[in-house]
Amino acid sequence: MAYINSKLSQLPLPIVEPFLVVDKSFVHEEFSHKGICDQNQRIYLENRYKSLFEEDQRFNRKVVSFQANKGESVHGWIKYKEGFSSQLVETLINEFGTESGTWLLDPFAGSATTLLVSNAMGINAIGIEILPICHLAWEAKHQSADYNLQELDSIMRLLLATKPVDNGHKFPHVTITEGAFSPEIERDLMFYTEWFEKLKVSNRTKLLCKLIITSILEKVSYTRKDGQYLRWDYRSEKVRKANSVRIESGKPPVKKIDKGDLPNVKEALIKTFQEVFVDISILQKIYIKNGSIQKLIKGNTLEVLPTLESNKYDGVITSPPYANRYDYTRTYALELAYLSMGTQINSLRQSLLSCTVESHSKIQILQDYYYSIDQSKKYDEILEILNTNPVLQEVNNALKIRWERGDMNNRGVLRMIEQYFQELTFVFAELFRISKTGSHIAFVNDNVRYGGEIIPVDTITTNLAEIVGFEPTKIYVLAQKKGNSSQQMERFGRAELRKCITIWRKP
């Protein structure tokens, strides 16, 4: 099998300078601040793959994030910060030469950008995603050509004439969303939730209305999505109480954001509804049905991938959660609570790829699952790759040393990083199985740094992909390099970290 044969690529080889001229600014010469920890394996991978590094003006931080989708028809209907742009997907589809009628896969589909672009280009596509808000976005977006414009126009007219009142319903808060809205905003949100539900319109249109009201939650709240957390406006009751306690104990108040004037619910709904109506009107004038198939599967990628057909997919375009401690169940807590998922947030968190310090190990779960589907041999082979990979051993040991030295503030990072690469290796092995010969795989990801240790996610994942059988072909490096946290810069200095698109091919 490819797993066993290509394990030879793990063995240390002499470091040979490639003939290609490489932009030195892309290449890390040091991975461990002041050489505290062993970094030889990371340097080895850097030299092994640096001939693949390439800066391409087609790719920048705007294109590989949600930013380029802002204002775009359909794609911008809901703010999914962790997604990438339709422009990125279209560029990669064209680069790979993917033709209509072929099959693409996105195992971390997010708000389904890959599926929507595939639909427009006549390409079949399957996505896998676990977050309910992403499924709501997909269900509403992919029916754009089927909405009844007269029905939407009548809703807009009725909406303009509404006067929200208290219907006695309460927002289904979870602990971390309590106080996110003023009493008036919360009253109006629940009024319009019931108002939309009682409209005598098609179920398709009701679904669109549900997405629209979900999309404005952040706009009308005292919160803002920011990395690992929701940040809170200084006017929120949560901040006022916290600062009152701090002042009483002689501490300075915590500085919080000022979101400025917040729109009321009716204003936000009207504005968003009008934008969606215009998008649908334009799309329906130019839309040509091409018969392609797109489907978003709800579930955990680690469990869904083994069920997919072998040798079927002509390409993969995806971006997994980054190893940056961002907890999507917190970032999207308002939306999850509104969709009545509050009781399931903890289970959702544990089902996501391990990217937070609270993630539990999935190795035993994976073993039980692979054994239950008679794939014990594959599980054992993948586990052997993980247990014998020298760069993973180096990274795990380096983080352990940094923790023992007091260079890190959360031991959970050690577990998170170890599990992150474990789980991705299972993903890569399944992608190799289900991909056709000649297919291309594109992964968007960020390098990270913890305790003064740079973890080159791009070269480590490329190495793991090569071990399971893929041929590495390109590592597109974004010109705008990412810094690291102010806490790390203060202790270990600034280190510019690559953001990359790694490209692999199934030979």
Image (spheres, grey):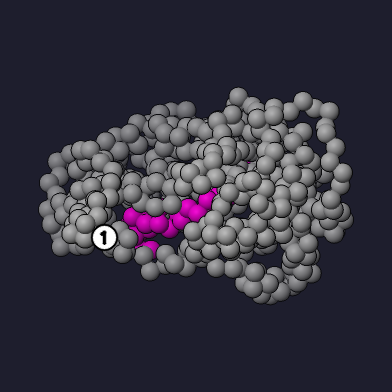
Residue 453 vs residue 322, the one in the foreground: 453
Location of residue 166 by image quarter: bottom left
Residue that appears at 39% across and 52% down: 229
- Answer few, some or many: residues within 10 Å of disc 1's Cα (few below 14, many 20 plus, some between 14 and 19): some
Residue 12 vs residue 113, the one in the foreground: 12
Residue 42 vs residue 163, the one in the foreground: 42
Q: Quadrant of the C terminus?
A: top right
Q: Quadrant of the N terminus?
A: bottom right
329 is within the stretch colored magenta? yes
Q: Position of residue 299 (x, y in %)?
A: 54, 61
Residue 318 vs residue 294, the one in the foreground: 318
Q: Position of residue 337 (x, y in %)?
A: 34, 60
Residue that appears at 28% across and 62% down: 173
Residue that appears at 43% across and 58% down: 329
Q: Is residue 293 visible?
A: no
Residue at disc 1, secondary structure: loop
Q: Determine whether 50 is above or below 44 in the image.
A: above
Residue occupied by mark 1 = 178
Q: Position of residue 153 (x, y in %)?
A: 27, 37
Q: Determine whether 253 is above or below 422 in the image.
A: above
423 is within the stretch colored magenta? no
Side (left or right) of 43 relative to 232:
right
Q: Amino acid at mark 1?
A: Glu
Magenta segment: 317-341
Q: Is residue 56 visible?
A: yes
Residue that appears at 30% across and 58% down: 177
Q: Position of residue 184 (x, y in %)?
A: 15, 51
Side (left or right) of 193 relative to 342:
left
